[in-house]
Image (cartoon, grey):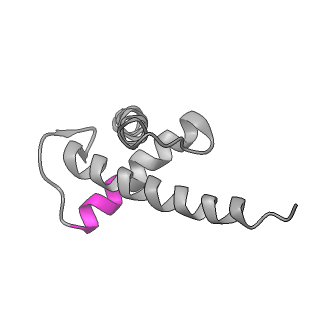
Amino acid sequence: MGWLWTIIVGGILGWLAGAIISKDIPFGIIGNILAGIIGASIGNALGLDIGPTIGGMSIIGTLAGAIILILVVSFIFGMFKGNKRA
């Protein structure tokens, strides 16, 4: 049952991070879930494991990590879009 909470909380926090910075995450809801789960890892690695915990993820740390991840992914996808030949 813990993995279900992780997926739900990861999806919500991934979506919220994208809404905060007004960037779309590739792959829709799957991208949101991945951004939330990977964001939790990034937030924990940066020592941002603070605030309330739901589904084994710190809300503040996961949100900060997901925002960082979305900015990096958006930057990389933006570089590939800019290199297309006309």
Q: Is residue 67 above or below residue 7?
A: below
In the rendered structure, does residue 69 fall within the stretch colored magenta? no
In the rendered structure, does residue 42 fall within the stretch colored magenta? yes
The residue under the point 53% across, 61% down is 75
Q: Is residue 64 left or right of residue 80?
A: left
Find the residue positioned furthest to the left: 51
Q: Is residue 46 above or below residue 60?
A: below
The residue under the point 54% across, 41% down is 24
Give the position of the N terminus as an image quadrant: top left
Q: Position of residue 60 (x, y in %)?
A: 20, 46
The residue under the point 60% across, 45% down is 26
Q: Is residue 22 above or below residue 68?
A: above
Q: Which residues are magenta?
A: 40-46
Q: Closer to the camera, 60 or 3?
A: 60
Give the position of the C terminus as an image quadrant: bottom right
The residue under the point 40% across, 49% down is 37
The main secondary structure of the magenta stretch is helix
Dividing the picture into quadrants, the one containing residue 6 is top left
Q: Is residue 29 left or right of residue 40?
A: right
Q: Closer to the camera, 31 or 71?
A: 71
Q: Position of residue 50 (x, y in %)?
A: 12, 52
Dividing the picture into quadrants, the one containing residue 11 is top left
Q: Position of residue 52 (x, y in %)?
A: 13, 40
